[in-house]
Amino acid sequence: MSDNDDTTNAQFPDRLSVDPNSPYYNAEILQRDVGIRFKGAEKTNVEEYCISEGWVRVTAGNAKDRRGNPLTIKVHGPVEPYFRDKK
């Protein structure tokens, strides 16, 4: 890794969710505009990720559950979180 690369996993929690009701929600980190590369491609529909277990939860189209939350699918593969802003 180069010195200019700020995608080190030490800056990110092992697991992060965008759902405020989740125990893995962290507003402070999400304010910095977190991006996710999954299997080398940038994903914009990620609801939750886990670096150590290697999975992301992505929304399944426009489908909603009975509580109005988006339906999600867990997909396994390499997860690379990064900050889109340059602070």
Image: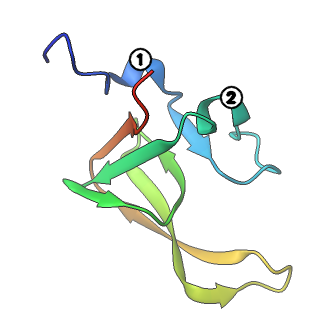
What's the mark number on residue 28? 2
Q: What residue is drawn where x is 41% and y is 53%?
A: 55
Q: Secondary structure at mark 1?
A: helix
Q: Residue furthest left?
A: 2
Q: Position of residue 3 (x, y in %)?
A: 19, 10
Amino acid type indicated by mark 1: Ala
Above or below, comparing residue 9 to residue 35 in the picture: above
Residue 39 picture quarter = bottom left
Above or below, comparing residue 44 to residue 8 in the picture: below
Q: What residue is drawn where x is 23% and y is 21%?
A: 5
Q: Secondary structure at mark 2?
A: helix
Q: What residue is drawn where x is 41% and y is 43%?
A: 53
| Depth order, front residue of 3/79 | 3
Side of 3 relative to 21 (left or right): left
Q: Position of residue 63 (x, y in %)?
A: 64, 89
Tell me the distance, in whole angstroms, between the alpha carbons under discs 2 and 1: 15 Å
What's the mark number on residue 50? none
| Depth order, front residue of 14/87 | 87
Side of 77 relative to 59 (left or right): left
Amino acid type indicated by mark 2: Glu
Q: Position of residue 86 (x, y in %)?
A: 39, 27
Q: Position of residue 85 (x, y in %)?
A: 43, 34
Judged by depth in the image, the label closer to the viewer, 2 or 1, is 2
Q: Which residue is mark 1?
A: 10
Side of 20 relative to 76 (left or right): right
Identify the coloring: rainbow
